[in-house]
Image: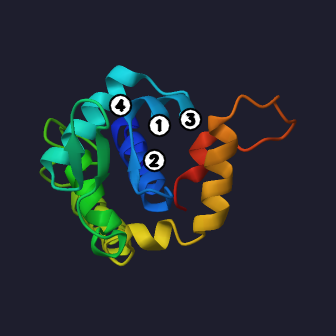
Amino acid sequence: MQLTRHTDYALRVLIHLAVAPTGRATIGEIADSYDLSRNHLMKVVHHLGQGGYLDTQRGRGGGFTLARPAEAITLGEVIRHTEPDMNMADCGSCALRPACGLSGILRAATSAFLAVLDQHSLADASRDRAGLAAIIATLSSPAPAVSGACEPSALLPD
């Protein structure tokens, strides 16, 4: 299963906030750190706010924070909120559908995938706070590129 870019960005935002020293960030900070589109990130942050994951504040001194403790946000609920369609295949229009067992197997696989994510919180994904904060700090500063440097997507939980 491959998650959408929207979910990728949402997880980066949440992990970023979980390890941020002040617990607050702005779209500009995160977009610059991970070299992400500000427009797309704005939509992600808005969606996370609507879902009750972020508290947002507009204007000078604004930004966003986690609406709940990292321990209270499960990865499964975030994935369900950000993924528009968890179907692994479009079995609805398939000619084999009346006799094929694949759709049930794929539903079971999706359920197992989400069950594992339900067992882990944002706190689990950001447990190495010092390590993540150090990586984020290097992403934010205009340092020369290092051969073999970690890509921002490596910040996503395994």
- Residues under numbered marks 1 and 2 in contact, where contact means CB atoms less than 8 Å apart: yes
Mark 4 surroundings: few (<14), some (14-19) or many (≥20) residues within 10 A: some
Which residue carries the number 3 mark?
33
Measured in 3D between alpha carbons, the distance from the residue under mark 4 to the one under mark 3, in whole angstroms, is 12 Å
Measured from the top left, where is residue 82 in percent x and y? 25, 46
For the residues bearing labels 1 and 4, Cβ distance under 8 angstroms: yes
Q: Residue flagged by tag 2: what amino acid is it?
A: Arg
Q: CA distance from mark 1 to mark 2?
A: 9 Å
Label 1, secondary structure: give it: helix
Count all numbered tags in the image, as a single digit: 4
Real-space Cα separation, disc 1 to disc 4, in angstroms? 8 Å
The secondary structure type at the circle numbered 4 is helix
**N-terminal of the two: label 2 or label 3?**
2
* Mark before the other along the chain sequence, 4 or 3: 3
Residue at 52% across, 53% down: 156
Residue 41: give its label.
4
Which residue type carries mark 3? Ser
Q: Can residue 21 be seen at all in this image of the molecule?
A: yes
**Image quadrant occupied by the C terminus:** bottom right
Label whose residue precedes the other's in the sequence (4 or 2): 2
> Marks 1/3: CA distance?
5 Å
Q: Earlier in the sequence, mark 1 or mark 4?
A: 1
Residue found 29% across the figure and 36% down from its top:
44
Along the horizontal axis of the image, is 34 left or right of 110? Answer: right
**Which residue is identified by label 1?**
30
Q: Amino acid at mark 4?
A: Leu
- CA separation, marks 4 and 2? 10 Å
Instruction: Please give the residue where the numbered disc 2 appears in the rendered image.
Output: 12
